[in-house]
Amino acid sequence: MSLHPPTLSRRWALSLLVLALGAGPAWAQAGIVLTGAGPINRSMGGASVGAPLDGTGALYWNPATISALPSSSLDFGLELLYPQTRLSSSISGLGAGSDRGDNGIFPLPTGALVYKVEGEPWTFGLAATPVGGFGVNYAASNSNPVLTPQPPNGGGLGAIFTELQVIQVAPSVAIQITDQLSIGGGPILDLVSLRADPLFLTAPNADGTYPSGTHSRVSWGAGFQLGVYYALDDGWGLGASFKSPQWFEDLRFLSTDQLGRPRTSTVNFDFPMITSIGVGYSGFERWLLAADLRHIDYGNTNGFRQGGFDPQGAVRGLGWRSIFAVALGAQYQWTDEISVRAGYSYNQNPIADSQSSFNVASPTILEHSLYLGASYKVSDNLSLSVAYVHCFQNSVNGPLVTPFGAVPGSSVSSTTSADSLLLGATVRFGGKCSAN
């Protein structure tokens, strides 16, 4: 059966829309999950479940470990993320093109408070950290099929803008059961903001165009985390932690249809469950070594486990699979005032080959990252830290898939890399912990 040109353009648009969701820079290397928080934890590759070093990293990955920190502390951090992305596509009869994203620099602030009750086994903590997201800013194009105008004037999406931010506020409490064993946990409050133009996760208008999704508000979510930490006498530390799924309320968008009439759209997704185990070793003089293994359960998370198009032409979900991630870190106490760190992280790609066309420009393609950092002890109460992160370039490509199958002679590819500079300060107060 032959298709009229407007219908064919709509088929291309339905397929190209999914590129927008992942067409931005990754704020993380394990899907949309950040590998760590703050300059100290990030410079260790995010490894901290069994090797606590600072309040931010402890509260981010294992709240039980705040019992093992030497004193009460207040951490401040700022990450400046600079992603580099390129989106290329070609379709027989429509041409080919390649465009670089004008994404800019993303500021990611962090903060954490740890308070140790003197003479008591209780330690309290409060952290506010970004945990994931993405964003992109691609200009429209006359040659790159993905970025050509939407129907009826073309078969693409036009200019693409997306930005997702997920911030978590995590109050925690830990209790030291024995000199070696601590447990901890607490609720998590989530703040979620998504803006997308065009809004590809909703059904298209009658003319095949997608509405704008820039008129939205901050949505809320909640979950919890639990952790356990065991310190052995010979320098070994063992830890495990569990972050529940974060259940978000529906994200609402006040948009318009092709005639400018009001239209309200909703999008629903959650944040994945994360299970981590970790080990630390400080038996070598001046050294601390750490390794974490995580499982991130995208495959059972609303909005990620679903894939493909629904009957109205909206994307049901990203079709991701659950993944494992590894984080390795080492710290060397160079002098009494200066410590230096290095780390490495690797994660599996959550996108199966069958779902590559729905995520081909996704930031989740980043797999390997290196981390460097250092801290300077200005006084007994103040330390300054700096870190650098490089996410190695990775590319994916595949054919364009429509609800009716792959488009013959089509190709879409994305190349992504990222660099980050982190700065931070730690203020210590209160007495030192004598138990650990």
Image: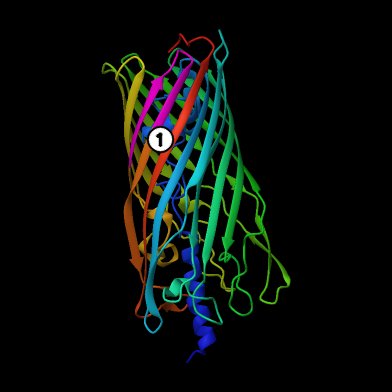
Q: Residues within 10 Å of mark 1 (few under 14, many from 20)?
A: many
Give coordinates of residue 277: x percent, y percent: 40, 33
Residue range highlighted in magenta: 370-386
Q: Is residue 155 above or below residue 299?
A: below
Identify the residue at image location x=46%, y=65%: 19
416 left or right, relative to 68? left
Amino acid type, residue under disc 1 in the picture: Arg
Quick check: is 330 in the magenta stretch? no
For the view shown, which residue lies furthest in the bottom direction? 2
**Residue designated by label 1:** 42
Whether residue 55 is visible, yes or no, is yes
Q: Is residue 200 above or below residue 85?
A: below
Identify the residue at image location x=54%, y=31%: 111
Name the quadrant of the C terminus.
Answer: top left
For the view shown, which residue lies furthest in the right direction? 262
Identify the residue at image location x=63%, y=45%: 221
Which secondary structure lies at badge 1? helix
Q: Nearer the viewer, residue 107 or 155?
A: 107
Identify the image quadrant of residue 401: bottom left
